[in-house]
Image (tube, coloured by chain):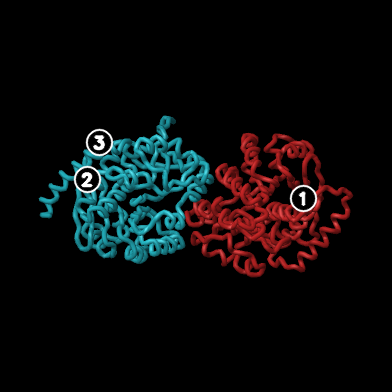
Chain colours: A cyan, B red
């Protein structure tokens, strides 16, 4: 498969104040990014480690969407599963369903290893992988594998890594990869600035060929070299925004690699995110909305041609 | 590598009941290595580790010519835990700082997979595995065992030993040749009170050998429907730190059985390992041939006190 979405998959169950719980929702960066790409193209797969209960939760979605099981490795007895408790002020707490100790060990156990990228990727592969910066050893090994296998890499950075003291290291990594994704609050902290203009200047200094900066409900900026484009979000009926960052990043990676057009990349990324917000978990039937998504992308692109004089 | 301990390095900061605090103590599966290497040169570990492992384990590895073949360096930090002993003999254990780097996520990432075992199990004769009830892991080990014909010693963890896990434990034992459990764990698992009741229950398990550890008293070696009590070999000097006696003695029993010793001798050698383990913080630092000769002579002397001549389990 050409487009590979790696990272964790995770299950969420919401606890309500009255003590009841929601059903269990499938999620995790790998599947959200995968859905973001699979909306447009079937030449994609996940690359993830899972529990042996995986099919019980993800199987229906996988079958509904004719998703491949290639790249899915069973490594433990259970998938990472969180309880989420939302509070009136909008904040939430989370806990491992399997207990703090056991849940944390299992989550670590299921994280990806560099040798798995080496086995799965070749020079035609385009890899999405969200990962923090903390583990230098992992990064050294990952970049070594990338040099060896010559795949294209989209890195989605996490909030804990986007801090000023990591900026130099992020620049070093960005000089060795092709694509980068961050959200606006993270970018403000990373560059120590307050406005979008300043953040965009910072993004253009990273030395990565293509990047996106996600700005929540407003959409995203796509950045190529010293140019940037504001791409508005696509309004859909919102049920749950979980995973939109992963979904849009995966789609942007796919679309930019496919079209080499940063505007179209942003449009397709926002459309993928639009379908992602319409339900808990990823879009349930991607094939059923592909044609609609393609038409929407073409129509929206015409508008941007006029806006940007493309 | 002929013998391997499968697990994790855990460096410890130990706080004892009398208030002593000792930092940077080698631990975790280092005790498993000790129990193997004291009796056989070609012994080491299968694990993930941090790139900082040499800070605490490097000199010990060099001194004892321990193979690094089974170690994959995966993160920046080897697991480092804080262990606080309580007056009742139990202890509290947690990561030294509550961050992902040193924490349980890191521990999980470093925990060896069955694929890690497969990578190096070509010449393996015996695996000492200290692990919980991870069915997927055990079933994969079972497949490797079938194709490579090594022996497996399982030292069960305390948290697993509750009656509701009994069925899963019995299922896991299909992948295990030798089993190690202590007295409180056995009582809890079977819901019984006396050593006699424990022995009766342990004899029902479908394994070739069980090392039943009864604390300061010593241990029982169990094979089939026979058992032999092997009293603790007390160290008359200062008992510096008893941590790891169960791990190291269990690993020694594996080597003993695989090298053709009978169950009584396996118990004696296990006790001798514990006898040396208590003399310092962490495992024995210099596991020399001179020390092994001394231990072997002691084992033979003690073995002569037993009239029984049970057949070795592993010819």
Report the residue marked by disc 2: A233
Residue A264 % position (x, y): 20, 51
Q: Give the number of the disc on residue B216.
A: 1
User: Residues under labels 2 and 3: Cα distance?
Assistant: 12 Å
Label 3, residues with CA under 10 Å away: few <14, some 14-19, many ≥20 = few
Q: Nearer the viewer, residue B313 or B78?
A: B313
Is there any visible trace of residue B17 in the rendered image?
A: no
Whether residue A9 sits left or right of residue B153 in the image: it is: left
Horizontal arrangement in the rendering, residue B164 relative to residue A168 (left or right)? right
Label 3: chain letter: A
Q: In which chain is the residue bearing label 1?
A: B
- Name the residue that disc number 3 marks: A237
Q: CA distance from mark 1 to mark 2?
A: 69 Å
Few, some or many residues within 10 Å of mark 2 (<14, 14–19, 20+): many
Q: Crowding at label 1, few (<14), some or many (≥20) Cα neighbours within 10 Å?
A: few
- Screen quadrant of the C terminus of chain A: bottom left
Q: Circle 2 sits in a helix, a strand or a loop, which is it?
A: loop
Residue at image location 68% in from the left, 61% down from the top: B283
Would residue B139 be seen by someone viewing this image from the given angle? Answer: yes
- The residue under the point 59% across, 65% down is B56
Give the percent coordinates (x, y) of residue B260: 77, 54
Label 3 near label 2: C-beta < 8 Å? no
Q: Chain of mark 2?
A: A
CA–CA distance in space, label 1 to label 3? 68 Å
């Amino acid at each position: 498969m050409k487009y590979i979405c790696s990272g964790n998959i995770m299950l969420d169950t919401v606890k309500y104040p009255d003590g009841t719980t929601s059903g269990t929702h499938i999620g995790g960066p790998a599947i959200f990014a995968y859905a973001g790409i699979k909306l447009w193209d079937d030449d994609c797969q996940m690359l993830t480690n899972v529990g042996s209960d995986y099919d019980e939760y993800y199987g229906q979605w996988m079958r509904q969407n004719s998703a491949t099981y290639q790249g899915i490795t069973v490594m433990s007895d259970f998938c990472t599963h969180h309880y989420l408790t939302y509070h009136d002020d909008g904040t939430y707490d989370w806990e491992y369903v399997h207990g703090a100790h056991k849940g944390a060990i299992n989550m670590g156990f299921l994280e990806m290893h560099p040798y798995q990228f080496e086995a799965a990727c070749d020079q035609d592969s385009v890899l999405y992988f969200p990962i923090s910066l903390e583990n230098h050893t992992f990064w050294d090994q990952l970049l070594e594998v990338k040099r060896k296998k010559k795949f294209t890499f989209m890195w989605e950075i996490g909030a804990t890594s986007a801090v000023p003291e990591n900026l130099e290291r992020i620049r070093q990594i960005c000089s060795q990869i092709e694509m980068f994704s961050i959200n606006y609050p993270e970018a403000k902290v990373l560059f120590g600035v307050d406005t979008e203009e300043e953040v965009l200047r910072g993004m253009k200094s990273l030395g990565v060929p293509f990047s996106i900066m996600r700005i929540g409900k407003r959409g995203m900026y796509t950045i190529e070299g010293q140019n940037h484009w504001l791409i508005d979000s696509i309004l859909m009926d919102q049920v749950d925004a979980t995973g939109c960052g992963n979904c849009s990043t995966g789609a942007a990676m796919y679309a930019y690699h496919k079209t080499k057009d940063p505007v179209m990349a942003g449009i397709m990324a926002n459309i993928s995110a639009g379908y992602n917000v319409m339900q808990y978990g990823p879009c349930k039937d991607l094939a059923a909305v592909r044609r609609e998504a393609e038409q929407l992308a073409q129509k929206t692109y015409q508008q941007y041609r006029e806006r940007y004089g493309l | 590598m002929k013998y391997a301990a499968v697990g994790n390095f855990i460096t410890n900061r130990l706080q004892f009941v009398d208030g002593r605090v000792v930092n940077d103590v080698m631990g975790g599966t280092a005790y498993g290595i000790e129990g193997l290497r004291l009796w056989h040169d070609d012994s080491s570990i299968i694990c993930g580790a941090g790139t900082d492992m040499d800070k605490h384990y490097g000199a010990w590895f060099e001194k004892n010519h321990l193979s690094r073949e089974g170690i994959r360096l995966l993160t920046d930090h080897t697991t480092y835990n804080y262990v606080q002993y309580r007056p009742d003999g139990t202890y509290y254990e947690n990561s030294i700082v509550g961050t992902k780097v040193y924490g349980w996520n890191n521990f999980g990432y470093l925990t060896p997979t069955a694929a890690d075992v497969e990578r190096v199990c070509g010449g393996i004769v015996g695996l000492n595995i200290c692990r919980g009830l991870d069915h997927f892991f055990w079933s994969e080990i079972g497949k490797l065992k079938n194709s490579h014909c090594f022996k497996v010693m399982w030292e069960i963890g305390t948290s697993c030993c509750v009656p509701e896990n009994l069925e899963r434990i019995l299922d896991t034992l299909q992948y295990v040749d030798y089993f190690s459990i202590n007295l409180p764990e056995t009582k809890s698992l079977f819901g019984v009170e006396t050593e006699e009741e424990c022995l009766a229950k342990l004899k029902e398990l479908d394994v070739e050998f069980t090392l039943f550890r009864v604390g300061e008293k010593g241990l029982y070696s169990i094979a089939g429907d026979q058992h032999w009590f092997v009293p603790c070999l007390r160290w008359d000097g200062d008992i510096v730190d008893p941590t790891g006696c169960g791990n190291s003695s269990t690993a020694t029993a594996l080597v003993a059985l695989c090298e053709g010793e009978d169950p009584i001798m396996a118990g004696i050698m296990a006790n001798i390992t514990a006898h040396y383990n208590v003399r310092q913080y962490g495992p024995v630092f210099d596991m020399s041939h001179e020390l092994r000769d001394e231990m072997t002579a002691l084992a033979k002397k003690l073995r002569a006190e037993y009239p029984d001549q049970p057949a070795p389990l592993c010819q």
